[in-house]
Amino acid sequence: MKTLVLSPERRQRLVDELCKLASQDFDIALSPFQAGELVDRMTALIGPAVYNEAVQDVRMHLQRGLDDLDGEVFVDDPA
């Protein structure tokens, strides 16, 4: 599996949200550097699990579509 890489914009939004959350909910002041390190570590830690869950969700969705395929396109053979 390839490494999950966030776009700079998405990473910055997460850093900003983490700084805000730490301040509001935990009364902790995180620097942007500290929040960025946490975002990077959490992305590396939970990224593969989230990715695998998404792959399984897509697989189930596609399988349901394939299971319905006969009912959608099957043509009775008159012979």
Image: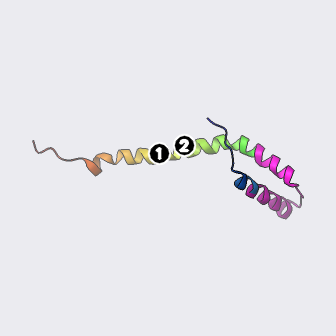
Start and end of the magenta stretch?
13-41
Residue 28 counted in the magenta span: yes
| Image colouring | rainbow
Tell me what residue is drawn at x 47 percent, y 45 percent.
60
Query: Which residue in the rendered view is the most extreme toward the front?
Result: 8
Query: Which residue in the rendered view is the most extreme toward the top?
Result: 1
Q: In which quadrant will I find the N terminus?
A: top right
**Nearer-N-terminus badge (1/2):** 2
Circles 1 and 2 in contact, beta carbons < 8 Å? no
Q: Is residue 62 left or right of residue 48?
A: left
- The residue carrying mark 1 is 60
Indicate the position of residue 34 as horizontal and vertical percent values. Answer: 86, 50
Indicate the position of residue 36 as horizontal and vertical percent values. Answer: 81, 50
- The residue carrying mark 2 is 55
Q: Principal SS element in the magenta part?
A: helix
Q: CA distance from mark 1 to mark 2?
A: 9 Å
Tell me what residue is drawn at x 77 percent, y 49 percent.
39
- Name the amino acid, label 2: Val
Q: Is residue 2 left or right of residue 63?
A: right
Tell me what residue is drawn at x 89 percent, y 61 percent.
27
